[in-house]
Image (cartoon, helix red, strand yellow):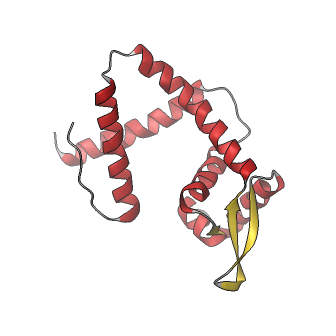
Amino acid sequence: MQLDELAERLLLSCSVLTRSATAAAPGTSLSLTQARVLGNLDRLGPQRISRLAELERCAQPSMTSLVTRLGDAGHVRRTADPLDARAVLVELTATGRAALVADRQRLCAPVARTLHDLPVDTGDLERLTGLLEEITHHLETGRTTRVATL
């Protein structure tokens, strides 16, 4: 199989996995976009609204509105950017981190049940997860790391 075909299958599989886990999990107060924004803040630390909009590929006014809703819910707070007094940084609060953790646990539960029911070797899953993490890291940073073999 060609690498382009494998890349397409991998991307589609990851997308379906996320959608299926979302559909199989009980409801939450976070939308998918809210969870992604909180996840970005958790991974990257405080960010400007313009950077969050860039990461979500949306207009800055849309992100401003989303950040306002997240702020009203206590999930984020705005602080002054120490490098530019005119700019504002958005940072994750303890409440936001707790909501993100709860959302991730909710989504992981049906996946964990499925993995438990499948005759899959844990070592294979660990190697697969490591490989996916390396691919993701490379896409985010543009840097190649040593890729584990399955």
Q: Is residue 107 above or below residue 121?
A: below
* Left or right: 55 as drawn, with respect to 134: right
Q: How many marks?
A: 0
Q: Is residue 14 above or below residue 112?
A: below
Residue name at image x 34 percent, y 34 percent: 126
Q: Nearer the viewer, residue 6 or 87?
A: 87
Residue name at image x 73 percent, y 65 percent: 64
Residue at the extreme left of the image, as rendered: 1
Q: Position of residue 16 (x, y in %)?
A: 45, 34
Q: Position of residue 34 (x, y in %)?
A: 66, 50
Q: Is residue 11 above or below residue 84?
A: above
Q: Position of residue 128 (x, y in %)?
A: 31, 36
Residue name at image x 65 percent, y 44 percent: 100
Q: Position of residue 87 (x, y in %)?
A: 70, 80
Quarter of the rendering containing residue 70: bottom right
Quadrant placement of the N terminus = top left
Q: Nearer the viewer, residue 4 or 76?
A: 76
Residue name at image x 60 percent, y 64 percent: 52
Quadrant placement of the C terminus = top left
* Left or right: 77 as drawn, with respect to 4: right
Q: Nearer the viewer, residue 12 or 40?
A: 40
